[in-house]
Image: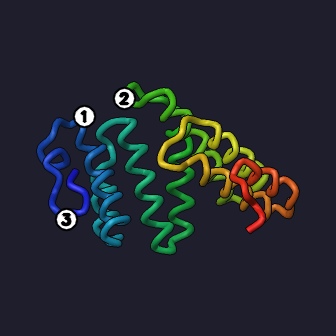
Amino acid sequence: ILPNSGRRSPRATNGPASERGWAFSEWAHFNLNDFSDAKAALAHAKQGLGFTQGSTVRADIELIGVEVWSGHDEQALEYSKDLDSKAHARSSETTQSYFEQNSLISTAWLSSLVGDLKTSGTQWLRVAKTPEFLGLARLSHALAATAFTLDHDPETARHALEPLEPTDD
């Protein structure tokens, strides 16, 4: 993958089949997050489907991201429901910690979409306890607090933020 360059990924187009799904998914991620190109991201995410179990999960995550940022809530919900069952089945190509974290995130995310905010907040706090990856622990505390606040539980929301001190801003 060639981030910030706009150039195509040799792994996606010519790489081994076991890597193509992952490469297309990463390409979709760059399309959306580096270039704000939802149309290209959607196309590449769809191209990432069906190679391997693990890369299909990654492609589904990118499809959800495209639909969320495009304002297509119903389609994001449908993709999220489809992803949830896949996220709870570990594939041989992912590490145990990646699988555990993705499984928790999937439950937290889907719970928030269907309005089960207490479960969502609780799951985000579980995500915060997984091995750190790109600031996800801090974000998870904030997402948990948001879910608890939306569930009209400000005390639990405040506790969710305590590890992020200071919380008096």
Q: Residue at x 33, y 66 (%)?
A: 34
Who comes first in sequence, dot 2 or dot 3?
Answer: 3
Q: In screen coordinates, is 156 left or right of 58?
A: right
How packed is label 3: few (under 14 Cα within 10 Å), some, or many (20 or more)?
Answer: few
Tag shown at residue 57: none
Identify the element where label 3 is drawn. Answer: loop
Q: Is residue 53 above or below residue 161?
A: above
Who comes first in sequence, dot 3 or dot 1?
Answer: 3
User: For the C terminus, which image quadrant?
Assistant: bottom right
For label 3, the residue is: 6
Give coordinates of residue 51: x percent, y percent: 29, 40
Q: CA distance from mark 1 to mark 2?
A: 9 Å
Closest to the observer, 63 or 96: 96
Give coordinates of residue 88: x percent, y percent: 55, 35
In which quadrant of the rendered view does residue 167 lie?
Answer: bottom right
For label 1, the residue is: 18
Q: Is residue 91 above or below residue 33?
A: above
Q: CA distance from mark 3 to mark 1?
A: 23 Å
- The disc labelled 3 sits on which kind of residue? Gly
Who comes first in sequence, dot 1 or dot 2?
Answer: 1
Identify the element where label 2 is drawn. Answer: loop
Closest to the observer, 167 or 67: 167
State yes or no: discs 1 and 2 in contact (Cβ < 8 Å). Answer: yes
Q: Residue at x 51, y 31 (%)?
A: 97
Q: Is residue 42 above or below residue 162?
A: below
For label 2, the residue is: 93
Identify the element where label 1 is drawn. Answer: helix
- The disc labelled 1 sits on which kind of residue? Ser
